Amino acid sequence: MVRVGIAGVGFMGWIHYLSYQRTEGIELAAICTRNAAKLAGDWTSIKGNFGPPGEKVDVSQLSCYDNIDALLADESIDVIDVCLPPNLHADVTCKAFAAGKHVFCEKPIALNQAECDQMMAAAQNSGKQLLIGHILPLLPEYAHALEVIRSGQYGKVIGGSFKRVISDPTWIEGFYDPAIVGGPLVDLHIHDAHFIRILFGMPKSVSSQGRMRGDVVEYCNTMFEFEDSSLAVSATCGVINQQGRPFTHGFEIHLEKATLQYELAVVGDTGETLIPLTIYDDNGEVIRPDLGDGDMEKAFDREIAEVLSAIANNKPSNVLSGDLAADALRMCDAQTESVRDRKSVAI
């Protein structure tokens, strides 16, 4: 049995907690938070944009710590699940590796390349796994698209366009601060950068046009250039100031013998699937795969199962590895430089 300690009891800590209850072979054994109410099991203050609100939790069978050093000193814990703000990821991750733990850390891996390099070096020196919680490839539409592409049934992937746009998240403190949350690219677009990296490999350069807000990109369009010059890949990301459409994401992915399309938008308070995952093949057939009930929480169950598999088999995950997450951050940093300096930037 793999034993996990969650560092940070907020929305993601709550969602992970629920998934641990449903996943065999891995168990939540400890929590760490400075919040006295949450430490005692009162998680009712937790709310998010999907899933159930927080509840009263029975913590009697958990080891409950109010400081990270005490959690890391617990020799019974195999994995530290880092659900802390992004500006704390590097410090806690490096300490966890020094304590001989595996690390499962929420995205983004870090806020800058220096922190990312520290985390990657600490993982290598410890011989333990670094897994980053990039959930996108495990969401039903994206997971199915990835499965179809990897199957090769429609030939190789030759390009695509990706979208991820939100209204101004005024409730997130420090959202536009590169030292706290990181802004729209590092907090938001990094999902698509990670997925693009999985599908097409690492681009050799980016060319982005958009708007800055202070030191971070507010909104941009990006073209990605690869060694394979036949690939045509683009992405749109950022913040708009129309609060009536708080979120939209989607893709159109081109293969030699098919096109995959999907788009979802939240309009007001209601999520609407504008285009269900649809496959258009070269014979004129239109296919709408059955993706089940679309429950977001099941994607996190698959994520926890992926963490367990990587650790149990001592093999890096092909969707959650630290290497992929580090590359996604490098892509975002290059896009920021491209928008700021109005030039193509090599990666």
Image (tube, rainbow, N blue to C red):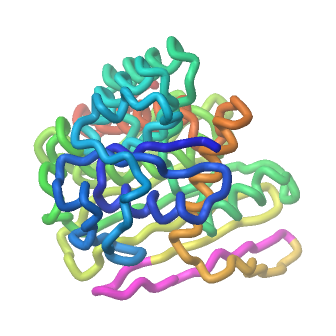
Give the quarter of the image for residue 116.
top left
Residue 199 x/y as whole percent: 65, 46
Would you say residue 337 is visible in this rendering?
A: no
Residue 292 x/y as whole percent: 68, 80
Please name the residue shown 62% across and 59% down the image. 23
**Magenta-colored segment: predominant secondary structure:** strand
Residue 117 x/y as whole percent: 40, 19
Please name the residue shown 25% across and 55% down the image. 39
Q: Quadrant of the N terminus?
A: top right
Magenta-drawn stretch contains 269: yes
Q: Is residue 29 above or below residue 201?
A: below
Q: Is residue 248 found left or right of 22 in the rendered image? A: left
The residues colored magenta run 265-282
Q: Is residue 101 above or below residue 196?
A: above
Q: Is residue 231 above or below residue 253?
A: above
- Asked whether 229 or 133 is in front, the reply is 133
Would you say residue 92 is visible in this rendering?
A: yes
Q: Is residue 39 above or below residue 342?
A: below
- Asked whether 163 or 53 is in front, the reply is 53
Residue 19 x/y as whole percent: 53, 62
Please name the residue shown 26% across and 45% down the image. 85
- Asked whether 294 or 258 is in front, the reply is 294
